[in-house]
């Protein structure tokens, strides 16, 4: 399960998050006061993905300010060949507005860069979930020793494709290309899920780090 804190303002716990808003073609997140801010990722920027601590599954939004209900995939990243067992999709139900809505797929991956800091990248839309699927495919194609490593990807831009359900609309899909594997930096530690892969973490206080 993901942690319930990152920064703290008084008694309120804040998870540092990142998401991509298709309607705005923008990466958004929050600051230490939980205020919404935009992040400017440029083509060629490098981002570290802590793939060994990926979580995913189905989620359903009740609305009314309530947290989503989540049903988790079962990930096994302890061996040489990570694998995932998804649960059966739960049955949808009425939300706070009386509208029937379904459980939809999501994924969350800890990320770090000098622009983003350390935060949880949430892939919870039809477009961004394709981003997560691409990240996982490249991860599995470039597996290293799973103990204490993270994967560096380069942001290559946002691809537009026609919405299969509405020919008048386009889906915008952020794309990242695998570059290399490095030792897991300690900057990830405060957003690592309980019992997550924290081995071999080291500080990134090094001017030679390529991001």
Image (cartoon, rainbow, N blue to C red):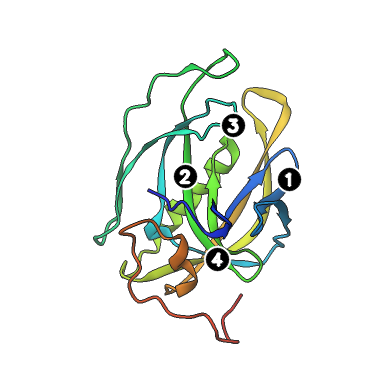
Label 4: few (<14), some or many (≥20) within 10 Å? many
Q: Which residue is mark 2?
A: 107
Q: Position of residue 95 (x, y in %)?
A: 54, 19
Q: Nearer the viewer, mark 4 or mark 3?
A: 3
User: How far is disc 2 from disc 1 in space, using C-alphas?
Assistant: 19 Å
Q: Nearer the viewer, mark 1 or mark 3?
A: 3
- Of the numbered discs 2 and 1, the one sitting upstream in the chain is 1
| Outermost bottom residue | 207
Q: Secondary structure at mark 4?
A: strand
Task: Give the numbered dot on residue 65.
Answer: 3
Q: Secondary structure at mark 3?
A: loop
User: How far is disc 2 from disc 4 in space, using C-alphas?
Assistant: 16 Å
Q: Are marks 1 and 3 in contact (CB under 8 Å)?
A: no
Q: Secondary structure at mark 2?
A: strand
Label 2: few (<14), some or many (≥20) within 10 Å? many
Q: Which residue is mark 4?
A: 112
Give the residue displayed 64% in from the left and 60% down from the top: 32
| Outermost front residue | 10
Q: Position of residue 83 (x, y in %)?
A: 29, 49
């Amino acid at each position: 399960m993901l942690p319930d804190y990152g920064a703290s303002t008084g008694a309120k716990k804040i998870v540092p998050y990142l998401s991509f808003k298709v309607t705005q073609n923008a990466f958004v997140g929050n600051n230490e006061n939980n205020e919404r801010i935009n992040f400017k990722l440029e083509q060629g920027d490098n981002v570290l993905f802590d793939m060994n601590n990926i979580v995913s599954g189905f989620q359903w939004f009740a609305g009314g300010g309530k947290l989503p209900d989540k049903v988790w995939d079962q990930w096994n990243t302890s061996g040489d060949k990570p694998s995932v067992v998804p649960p059966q999709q739960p049955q949808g139900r009425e939300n706070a507005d009386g509208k029937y809505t379904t459980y939809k797929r999501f994924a969350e991956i800890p990320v770090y860069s000098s622009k983003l800091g350390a935060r949880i990248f949430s892939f919870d839309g039809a477009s961004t979930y394709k981003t997560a699927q691409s990240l996982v495919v490249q991860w599995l194609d470039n597996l290293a020793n799973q103990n204490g490593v993270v994967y560096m990807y380069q942001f290559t831009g946002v691809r537009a494709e026609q919405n299969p359900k509405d020919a008048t609309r386009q889906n915008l899909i952020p794309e990242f290309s695998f570059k290399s594997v490095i030792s897991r930096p300690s900057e990830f530690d405060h957003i690592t899920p309980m019992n997550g892969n924290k081995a071999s973490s080291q500080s990134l206080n090094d001017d030679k780090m390529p991001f």
